[in-house]
Each structure stands twice: as structure tokens, then as C-alpha cells.
Image (cartoon, grey):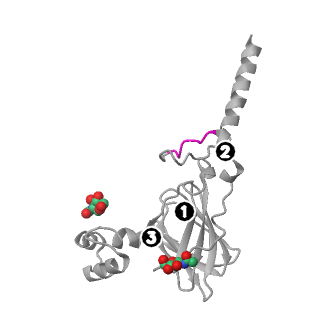
Amino acid sequence: MFQIIFLLSLFLSISNAANQDFCVADLKAPDTPSGYPCKPAATVTVDDFAFSGLIAPGNTTNIISAAVTPAFVAQFPGVNGLGLSAGRLDIAAGGVIPLHTHPGANELLIVTYGHITAGFVSSASTVYVKTLKKGEIMVFPQGLLHFQIAAGKSGAVGYVVFSSASPGLQILDFALFASNFSTPLITKTTFLDPVLVKKLKSVLGGSG
Ligand SMILES: *[C@@H]1O[C@H](CO)[C@@H](O)[C@H](O)[C@H]1NC(C)=O
Ligand SMILES: *[C@@H]1O[C@H](CO)[C@@H](O)[C@H](O)[C@H]1NC(C)=O
């Protein structure tokens, strides 16, 4: 009797394990703090686990002369539940990925072309900066403000890996100057000069 129960429970745990190999996101359902619900296994194909969207360079004709192309769960449903995702950075000469944070993930940068000067600021307000060449990597701990700049005249390319399928992205200057955060409140909460705040808002499209 015990053996039968043992075998039965073994069988059930094996079939459960098979169910939990992956949970490809059903992007038609709403995202939740624990990820998207799984799409039915019968509808999953290899294309859910592969992504071609990082082959093409991003368009760097913009105010930052740089582009971030995400392969987060919203673009790449196979990473749902796997605790990782990726992205591509294209930074034209003189371009910058401005100070930003990923509230939900650590980041690993791999430089694949050119040189990137990258840095982050710790909670103790220590600044860690290094210029990386092709093949070098650097990590940016979760939640900390960090940046990447093309060093040199050729522009640069890098790939990034995140420790979450939904790392999130908050760009400091966009939060302040591309939003409807009122100028008096920004001035009060950042100690910045209102003339500078208004100037940056007019460049980045903020209001208030
Ligand atoms: C890149 O973006 C700029 C500005 O939005 C646009 O004018 C240009 O056509 C885009 N280039 C490509 C190749 O999509
Ligand atoms: C900013 O805009 C959003 C959406 O339009 C609105 O919900 C919010 O109340 C606004 N905030 C302020 C401080 O005006």
C-alpha cells in the first residue's frame, strides 16, 4: 500500500515538474507582480524562446543620441518566470544613456563595439566609474542610479542582461523634466534653480 502511494506521489511530482519547465507569458492577460500567466503549453513554439529583436541597431537620432532596445518579457515572452531578460544599447558618438535605475533588477553590461564609460552611485554616495572596451563587462546593482556614455569618436554597442523578466526603467531627468512634476515642487525637493528646471522642461517636454 505504501509503495503504491509512494509511486503515485512520485508520478504526480514528475508530471508537476514537467508542467513547471517554463511559463511562456500570455501577453493578452494582464501582467502581475509575479509575472504574466502562462500561455497553454500546446501553443508554445521555439519562437517563444528565441528573440531576433536585438539584431538591428536602435535608432540613435534623438535627444540622447542613444537607444535602448528591450528584450523584456513584454517583447520576449519566453523569459516570463525565468528571472532574467536582456537588452541592446546603441550609443552614437557623444551619446548617453542618462542616469537611470532599474527598480527590479541587477544589470550586467557586455561591451561588443567601441568603448563605453559606465558608472553607478551607491547608497553611500560613492561613485564607481570605468571605461570599458569591447569584451569587458560590468555590473550595476539593483535600484542604483547608473549611466553609460560612448567614449571616443566611434560610438559604442553593448548588450545588457537583467536579473528579472521585468527590470523596469526610470530615467532621472525624464522623471523630473519630461513629466508634469510642478516646477515649484521640483525646486523644493531637489534644490535646483527654477530657471534651470524650466529650461530642462522645455528641452525634454515637461509641464507644470
Ligand atoms: C530615426 O528616428 C528619427 C527621429 O524620430 C527619424 O526621423 C528617422 O527616420 C529614424 N530612422 C530610421 C532608420 O528609422
Ligand atoms: C500628471 O498627469 C497625470 C496624468 O495626466 C495625472 O493623473 C496627475 O494627477 C498629474 N499630476 C499632477 C501633479 O498634476
Q: Which residue occupies 34% across, 73% down?
A: 177
Label 1 to label 2: alpha-carbon separation = 33 Å
The local crowd at label 2, few if under 14, some if 14 to 19, many if 20 or more residues have their Cα within 10 Å, is some
Q: Which residue occupies 56% across, 45% down?
A: 26
Q: Quadrant of the N terminus?
A: top right
Q: Position of residue 134 (x, y in %)?
A: 69, 77
The magenta stretch is 34-40
Q: Earlier in the sequence, mark 2 or mark 3?
A: 2
Q: Earlier in the sequence, mark 3 or mark 1?
A: 3
For label 1, the residue is 141
Q: Quadrant of the C terminus?
A: bottom left
Image mark for residue 36: none
For label 2, the residue is 44
**16 magenta-colored:** no
Label 2 to label 3: alpha-carbon separation = 46 Å
Q: Position of residue 71 (x, y in %)?
A: 59, 60
- Asked if ligand 2 lies within 8 A of label 3, the reply is no
| Mark nearer the viewer, 2 or 3 | 2
